[in-house]
Amino acid sequence: MLLHVPRILDADQLAQIRTALDAAEWIDGRQTVGAQGAQVKRNQQLPDASPLRERLGQQVLAALERNPLYFAAALPLRTLPPRFNRYAGGGEYGFHVDGSVMALERPGQARGQLRSDLSCTLFLCEPEEYDGGELVISDTYGEHEVKLPAGDLILYPSSSLHRVAPVTRGARLASFFWVQSMVRDDSRRRLLLEMDTAIQALARTGADQPSVLQLTGVYHNLLRGWAEV
């Protein structure tokens, strides 16, 4: 499932984050990947240990918690703390697949693991601020180019082959992170999202209440049977 989630961040939140990132110290993004990824990755990132990355990441997580469409689509169980990257001067990231299991470190808790079911990119620049920089996602239906307004997010299966096209003018800033969903299977998550969306639409139109209640029960019983928590 490839899903565009609009307006994760509002204008004030974007301005605060952009101001902080404009003054940030970046490192070579190849320091954060293995040997294979380093061959095709040319960008900059905030260091993982950066207090700024932690602070901005918390802002992003708080915004995600307030977005019902994101929650309904991702059904998040665990989320890797958001990271931030910058592409400029021809920077790109060639085709790759994200790692399947990632280390998850949370303050005050033992180091754990996260299975990457979903990859997320939150765009922090308007499309007209830079040329190139499209997120290109390849699946069974072909290649999809994604370049969203600032504050919008794209959510897609982590199993997808994907790349970031070269940025030939300006700079592309984004936050990116991975999610382990309560529902591992992508087709089941899609079905649950479609059902949830339909139930909400029926409720808004004043549909027969017992029928809406019955469908809501079906939704939760499917989630109960498929969720891994």
Image (tube, rainbow, N blue to C red):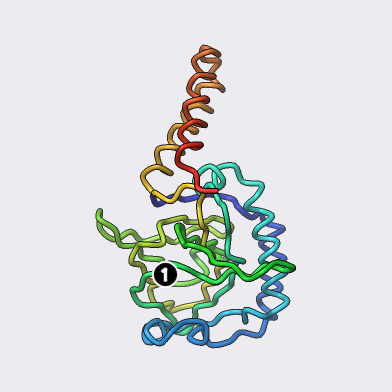
Residue at position x 55%, y 14% in the image = 209
Q: Nearer the viewer, residue 14 or 58?
A: 58
Q: Position of residue 205 (x, y in %)?
A: 53, 19
* Above or below 44: residue 5: above
Secondary structure of the residue carrying numbered label 1: loop
Q: Position of residue 173 (x, y in %)?
A: 55, 71
Q: Position of residue 21 (x, y in %)?
A: 66, 75
Q: Nearer the viewer, residue 86 or 220?
A: 220
Q: Residues within 10 Å of mark 1 (few under 14, many from 20)?
A: some
Q: Check disc 1 and give the amino acid type.
A: Asp
* Above or below 87: residue 3: above
Q: Is residue 179 left or right of residue 62?
A: left
Q: How many marks?
A: 1
* Above or below 160: residue 222: above
* Above or below 202: residue 70: below
Quadrant in the rendering for residue 165: bottom left
Residue at position x 55%, y 21% in the image = 203
Residue at position x 52%, y 82% in the image = 32
Quadrant in the rendering for residue 57: bottom right
Q: Is residue 28 left or right of residue 38?
A: right
Q: Which residue is mark 1?
A: 98
Q: Nearer the viewer, residue 147 or 100?
A: 100
Residue at position x 52%, y 64% in the image = 114
